[in-house]
């Protein structure tokens, strides 16, 4: 099993823990990942990291489809891949209707069909076999309309790799199945190695080289309950606040894990402004299954379930150097 370092979102003031990334690279971490929502973008911090490292792979976890056209993504990916000497992993995701329509001003319906077209276009542009023409439901090249002067074009940059790995962030069964069909890997936001059956059908036709890179919050602590409390807030935020009451993909996933009533309660409290109560209502069993918390001996024991799961890379959710080193000692 490989290890990656998940840097996640930057927060109100963009910062990059570059010394931590360099340490992760030194001790054998395979990849480092950044994220975006509606704050810092996903590529700028990754370029900062790439300029100060030499080996570690650079992953977007995830780049939002609505933020960029396929052409912009192909240009950006080809450029970063060249400058980093072939280290880019392009993690993409559709986000949700609140962000897509509220921030990017684009229509959200039919995300699977849009993703399929997006990936197909990026692949074709990077393969650079000729001028690109595409007539889809969501993307059209050249545009039929406007000045009517558009013409098929070919990427000027000669990509270092014509096949840059594309991973998909996905939660729903159909979306995960699509990832196994058109992508090189899957980025689950939450995964329980004790409930592999939840995704068994979606993953039944996995290719041998298909990657599953999952973020796991790691909190070594002598008191398991206290460690669980530290992990609860961000899970409560995803269940309660990262999505509308009528459509929240994170809540739906937690329900498929077997915590439907509990998830609905968390959302109800969160949307009512009772955030402390919402955090308290997050089931401890759920938190314990999707994180690694407690004494180091306990974490060591619970890593066995992850090793036996389909997950190929653990993306360590911690910026504590001692935690980063501990996970390397256990897995590398």
Image: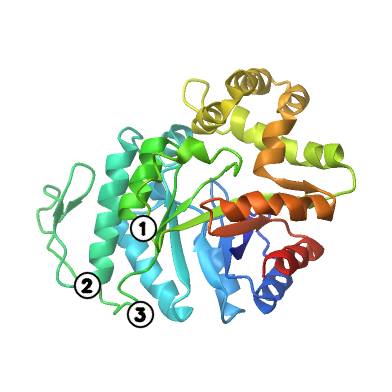
The structure residue drawn at horizontal position 60% and vertical position 79%, both measured from the top left corner, is 53
Number of marks in picture: 3
Asked which secondary structure carries label 3, the reply is loop
Q: Nearer the viewer, mark 3 or mark 1?
A: 1
Q: Which mark is residue 207?
A: 1
The structure residue drawn at horizontal position 57% and vertical position 74%, both measured from the top left corner, is 56
Question: Are the residues at dot 1 and dot 2 in contact (C-beta closer than 8 Å)?
Answer: no
The structure residue drawn at horizontal position 53% and vertical position 54%, both measured from the top left corner, is 311
Q: For the residue carrying disc 2, how many other residues have a C-alpha within 10 Å: few (<14), some (14-19), or many (20+)?
A: some
Q: Which residue is mark 3?
A: 160
Place of residue 136 in the rendered image (x, y in percent of width and height, measured from the top left): 17, 46
Q: Which residue is mark 2?
A: 128
Q: In the shown orientation, is residue 299 left or right of residue 155?
A: right
The first of marks 1 and 2 along the sequence is 2
Quadrant the N terminus occupies: bottom right
Quadrant the C terminus occupies: bottom right
Question: Are the residues at dot 3 and dot 1 in contact (C-beta closer than 8 Å)?
Answer: no
Q: Is residue 27 visible?
A: yes
Protein image colouring? rainbow
The first of marks 3 and 2 along the sequence is 2
- Residue 193 or 7: which is nearer the viewer? 193
- Residue 221 or 82: which is nearer the viewer? 221
Residue 301 vertical placement versus 156 (above, below): above
Place of residue 133 in the rendered image (x, y in percent of width and height, measured from the top left): 13, 59
Asked which secondary structure carries label 1, the reply is loop
Q: In the shown orientation, is residue 138 left or right of residue 267?
A: left
Q: For the residue carrying disc 1, how many other residues have a C-alpha within 10 Å: few (<14), some (14-19), or many (20+)?
A: few
- Residue 207 or 64: which is nearer the viewer? 207
């Amino acid at each position: 099993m490989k290890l990656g370092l998940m840097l996640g979102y930057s927060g109100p003031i963009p910062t990059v823990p570059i010394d931590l990334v360099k340490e992760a690279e030194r001790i054998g971490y395979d990849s480092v990942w950044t994220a975006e929502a509606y704050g810092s973008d996903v590529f700028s911090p990754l370029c900062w990291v790439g300029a100060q490292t030499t080996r570690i792979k650079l992953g977007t976890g995830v780049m939002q489809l609505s933020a960029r056209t396929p052409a912009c993504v192909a240009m950006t990916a080809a450029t970063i891949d060249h400058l980093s000497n072939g280290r880019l992993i392009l993690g993409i995701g559709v986000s949700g209707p609140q962000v897509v329509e509220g921030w990017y001003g684009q229509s959200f319906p039919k995300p699977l069909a849009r993703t399929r077209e997006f990936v197909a276009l990026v692949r074709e542009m990077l393969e650079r076999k000729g001028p690109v023409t595409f007539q889809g439901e969501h993307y059209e090249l050249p545009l039929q309309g406007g000045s009517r002067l558009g013409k098929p074009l070919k990427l000027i940059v000669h990509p270092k790799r014509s096949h840059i790995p594309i991973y998909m962030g996905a939660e729903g069964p159909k979306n995960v199945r699509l990832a196994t069909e058109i992508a090189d890997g899957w980025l689950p936001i939450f995964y329980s190695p004790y409930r592999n059956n939840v995704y068994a059908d979606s993953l039944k036709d996995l290719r041998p080289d298909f990657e599953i890179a999952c973020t796991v919050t790691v909190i070594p602590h002598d008191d398991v309950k206290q460690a669980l409390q530290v992990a609860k807030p961000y899970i409560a935020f995803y269940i309660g606040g990262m999505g509308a009451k009528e459509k929240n993909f994170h809540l739906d996933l937690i329900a498929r894990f077997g915590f439907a009533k509990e998830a609905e309660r968390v959302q109800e409290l969160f949307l009512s402004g009772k955030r402390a109560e919402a955090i308290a209502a997050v089931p401890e069993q759920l938190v314990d299954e999707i994180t690694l918390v407690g004494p180091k001996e306990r974490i060591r024991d619970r890593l066995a379930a992850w090793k036996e799961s389909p997950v190929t890379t653990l993306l360590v959710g911690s910026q504590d150097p001692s935690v980063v080193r501990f996970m390397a000692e256990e897995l590398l």
